[in-house]
């Protein structure tokens, strides 16, 4: 098993690391069932057409509030030692969601395309060693070339956009790498690494859970301390509540920013 030091080195050098099978089988089965149930619930509540139109088909929101299997992820936090070692022990969740690539979905199909997360940060940070967050994508299915495993471009983390010619097929065929991993594995990557869900050519959805952690000063995409019910937050320990953002006071005014200096 990859140790914390090795993982940190891999994330610094190539932008990502894969830890095989860190979730046990029962945990994976429970997460898979929860993904399926919540996706059906969302489709009924919002309608497939609406979710597709807003680019949210396949993304299951606010999972931490909606099933004990996700609460278990908040309790056990399997990737947190690596996250804390890189981001500090006040890192917290920017996004916690299901990412399901439907049959026929993934690269080449709307809305899946090459991108890096936290794009707004790359423009201004010129220190390529700086890691603003860590995207932990837990695979709930075996992932491979047929069913939409993640593509990454090793070493592209923090590169200015113009230096990553994602439209150049010859460059992509040399530079891009598609992950292969059994269910229960996690890929932990610098969100500034260029990546994309692969094309799912099978008849089955490809399910994953994303826990994207950021440094404590960054505005999260969702406020989980308010999105997750207090009875669930109350069952978590201090670290669980911290990653849900209960302790985080992201500055919201210039005065607050200056006061935190
Ligand atoms: O689902 C995948 O393989 C990639 C997910 C992704 O693009 C992201 O988490 O930003």
Image (spheres, rainbow, N blue to C red):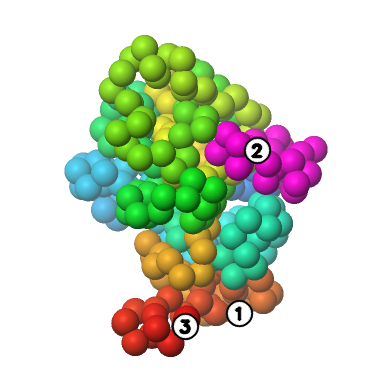
Q: Label 1, on which residue?
A: 234
Q: Label 2, on which residue?
A: 10
Q: Is residue 194 above or below residue 149?
A: below
Residue visible at 32% across and 37% down? 161
Say what secondary structure mark 3 lies in. loop
Is residue 32 visible in this depiction of the protein?
Answer: no
Q: Nearer the viewer, residue 232 or 16?
A: 16
The answer for how far apart the CA atoms under marks 3 and 2 are is 32 Å
The answer for how far apart the CA atoms under marks 1 and 2 are is 36 Å
Residue visible at 54% across and 48% down? 129
Look at discs 1 and 2 and give the one toward the viewer. Answer: 2
Q: How many marks?
A: 3
User: x, y percentage for residue 116?
Assistant: 39, 42
Q: Label 3, on which residue?
A: 260
Say which mark, if any, is on residue 209.
none
Say what secondary structure mark 2 lies in. helix
Magenta segment: 1-26
Q: Residues within 10 Å of mark 3 (few under 14, many from 20)?
A: few
User: x, y percentage for residue 45?
Assistant: 30, 55
Left or right: where does residue 67 sit relative to residue 195? right
Is residue 261 visible in this depiction of the protein?
Answer: yes
Residue visible at 30% across and 46% down? 56
Could you say which quadrant of the image residue 219 lies in?
Answer: bottom left
Q: Residues within 10 Å of mark 1 (few under 14, many from 20)?
A: few
User: x, y percentage for residue 205?
Assistant: 45, 31
Q: Are marks 1 and 3 in contact (CB under 8 Å)?
A: no
């Amino acid at each position: 098993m990859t140790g914390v030091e090795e993982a940190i080195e891999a994330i610094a050098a190539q932008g990502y690391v894969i830890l095989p099978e860190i979730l046990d089988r029962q945990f994976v089965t429970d997460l898979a069932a929860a993904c399926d149930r919540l996706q059906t619930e969302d489709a009924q509540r919002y309608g497939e057409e609406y979710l597709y139109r807003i680019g949210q088909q396949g993304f299951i929101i606010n999972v931490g509030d909606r099933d004990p299997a996700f609460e278990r992820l908040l309790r056990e936090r399997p990737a947190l030692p690596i996250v804390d070692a890189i981001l500090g022990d006040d890192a917290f969740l920017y996004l916690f969601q299901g990412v399901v690539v439907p049959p026929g979905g993934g690269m080449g199909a709307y809305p899946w395309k090459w991108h890096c997360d936290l794009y707004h940060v790359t423009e201004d940070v010129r220190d390529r060693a700086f890691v603003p967050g860590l995207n932990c994508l837990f695979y709930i299915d075996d992932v491979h070339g047929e069913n939409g495993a993640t593509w990454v471009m090793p070493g592209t983390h923090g590169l200015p956009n113009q230096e990553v010619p994602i439209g150049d097929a010859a460059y992509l065929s040399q530079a891009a790498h598609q992950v292969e991993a059994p269910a229960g594995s996690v890929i932990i990557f610098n969100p500034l690494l260029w990546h994309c869900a692969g094309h799912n050519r099978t008849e089955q959805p490809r399910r994953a859970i994303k826990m994207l952690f950021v440094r404590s000063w960054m505005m999260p995409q969702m406020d989980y301390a308010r999105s997750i019910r207090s009875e669930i937050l109350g069952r978590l320990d201090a670290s669980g509540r911290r990653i849900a953002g209960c302790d985080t006071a992201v500055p919201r005014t210039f005065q607050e920013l200056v006061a935190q200096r």
